[in-house]
Image (cartoon, helix red, strand yellow):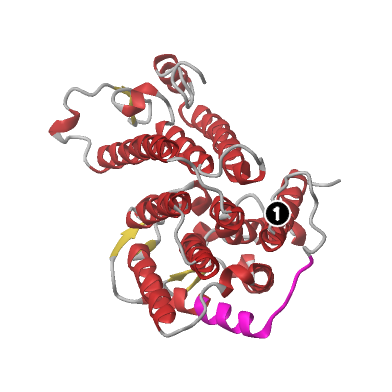
Amino acid sequence: MTSSIIKENVPMLLMGIVLPFYIAAKMESGNYDLLSFPTNWTPKLDLCVSVVYIAWLLGQLILYMLDVGEVIPGPVLRQGKRLNYRLNGFFAMVVNILVFLFATLCGFRVAVIFEKITEVVTIACLIQFLISFILLFTQKTENLPNYNINPVVNRGNILEDWLVGRSISPRIGFLDLKFVFARTGMIALVLFNFSVMAKYYEDNKTTNYTLLLAIGMALVYTADNLYHESSIVFIREMREGCGITLLIYMIGISVEYGLVVSYVATTKHELPLYCLLLIAVIFLLGYWTYRSSNNEKSHYRANPDDPIFKEYETITTASDKHLLVSGWWGMSRHPNYLGDIVIHVAMSFAAGFTNGLPHLNAALITSMLLYRERMDYDECKDKYGDDWDRYCHRVKWRVIPYIY
């Protein structure tokens, strides 16, 4: 009988493999018609691209290991164990941008990243498959500390172990592979978007303000997440196993998030100034909601006795946990999800509405966050019991106030 883990993760794995190649083929062909299936989406290996990609990936591992940035404890695992993480993702992004600019000044055609996107996706997928098999055969259950064992697998089913990972946090000394891969996808997005911009200028010898806005919004979102990297430490994925499903998902970030930028550049799509201003306002409102709500939550967790929270109301649970029912977290149970959705919807608006494909990422992000909210609800109901019912009675809206 097929387990629920296999039933849930095999489709996710297939989508995680197929979707990046599908999008890459669309980018290469310049045909962004959602209903037109690409004919050139087979994997392609290129020796030069592979060498550069592997060198770049090793560079990201080295940047994480540099003694730059704060080291903080991560989420509480079993036995009360907390692993340490170095927060230098913003520094790593800046270094990558400087190297990119230096390569450009030295005459290297950085536009080749965009032109060879299928080759990049191919080697990225192969590397992640290789890493997943190495982890499968080296992360033996009997050799893992109890706190690092993924509790949902390790039952003797090798397919389950491969799909979702035997360990929660595979490490080589202090180097946390999952954490580095999580931020590497965002850094790759920045470089990809810059490559698209370079290709556009190379072909047209001019600029496109719609393209600049699309790249700027993605850069702000990425830079913000890496600057506030401590929030990545506590996302759901950091408490789950590190298998092939998660690894493949992480490499798809740059391709899927880069859809709007590549569409605008390839089709030379331009919007009037008033549309650009409206999109920028929507994006900034989403960003304000996203960042302010996350900061409020982090601040309260770190220092609930701060005078700023003097007038805030909370619900005290049986486990002496205090649930905020004021401020952002009194408006909605997940105002950060709301902000995240608005951000991605605004970014997709830069592509206009004549084609559905550029809006794919916003649709995927929205569906993922709404699904995650349901998972959060079930977990909190199990954890807090009747106290969670009291909280939900007080904070009625799941994500969008007065709507959902």
Residue at 41% in and 24% down = 332
Q: Is residue 19 left or right of residue 297?
A: right
Residue at 61% in and 53% down = 267
Q: Residue furthest front?
A: 205
> Pointer 1: residues within 10 angstroms few (<14), some, or many (20+)?
some
Using the image as rendered, state which of residue 31 and residue 367 is in the foreground. 31
Is residue 137 visible to us here? Answer: no
Using the image as rendered, state which of residue 12 and residue 165 is in the foreground. 12
Using the image as rendered, state which of residue 163 and residue 139 is in the foreground. 163
Q: In the picture, residue 126 is in which quadrant?
A: bottom right
Query: From what the image shows, is residue 376 above or below residue 12?
Result: above
Is residue 185 visible to us here? Answer: yes
- Residue 54 magenta-highlighted: yes
Q: Amino acid at mark 1?
A: Leu
Q: Which residues are drawn in magenta?
A: 42-56
Q: In the picture, residue 356 is in which quadrant?
A: top right
Which residue is under mark 1? 19
Residue at 50% in and 57% down = 147
Q: Is residue 216 left or right of residue 36?
A: left
Q: Main secondary structure of the magenta part?
A: helix
Q: Position of residue 156 (x, y in %)?
A: 74, 59
Residue at 21% in and 40% down = 303
Q: Position of residue 41 (x, y in %)?
A: 77, 63
Q: In the picture, residue 69 is in which quadrant?
A: bottom left
- Residue 83 magenta-highlighted: no
Using the image as rendered, state which of residue 337 and residue 41 is in the foreground. 41
Q: Position of residue 17 (x, y in %)?
A: 72, 59
Query: From what the image shows, is residue 189 above or below residue 388?
Result: below
